[in-house]
Amino acid sequence: MKDSPHPTKRRRYDAAFRAEALRLAGESRSTQAAARALNISPKLLYKWQKEALTPIAAAREAELDPDTAAELRQLRALARRQAQELEILKKAIIIFSQTPDQ
């Protein structure tokens, strides 16, 4: 194995580059094509997309004020609770719609 004169270093991308990459990937038909255009790995771009969808990363990037962050947490908790209630009601409809033959 031949040692290279310069060790490879992991590249770091700033938030502006990431935001532009995510915007380009959103507008592009293919995430892989967007990654090629930016000369980055498609896996890295997929990772950034996944991180952008998580609430913690979104709140961290947005740097929300405490009141807005608290309201956001409450609204997300309410949305989760309502989704659970909806699932329960859907199951109840299925159970009660199956009437025994008399």
Image (cartoon, rainbow, N blue to C red):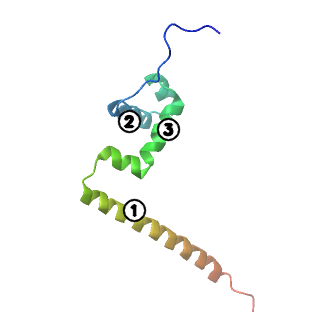
Instruction: Note whether residue 30 is visible.
Output: no
Q: Is residue 75 left or right of residue 87?
A: left
Q: Is residue 73 left or right of residue 39?
A: left
Q: What quarter of the picture does the C terminus occupy?
A: bottom right
Q: Nearer the viewer, mark 1 or mark 2?
A: 1
* Residue 49 spot, x, y in % from top left: 46, 40
Amino acid residing under circle 2: Arg
Instruction: Compare marks 1 and 2 and give the one earlier in the sequence.
Output: 2
The mark found on residue 47 in the picture is 3
Mark 1 neighbour class, 10 Å CA radius: few under 14, some 14 to 19, many 20 or more: few
User: What residue did someone put label 2 on?
Assistant: 23
Mark 2 neighbour class, 10 Å CA radius: few under 14, some 14 to 19, many 20 or more: few
Q: Residue at x 26, y 57 (%)?
A: 66
Give the image quarter of residue 21. Answer: top left
The CA span between labels 2 and 3 is 14 Å
* Residue 87 spot, x, y in % from top left: 55, 70
Mark 3 neighbour class, 10 Å CA radius: few under 14, some 14 to 19, many 20 or more: few
Instruction: Compare marks 3 and 1 and give the one earlier in the sequence.
Output: 3
Looking at the image, is 21 positioned above or below residue 59? above
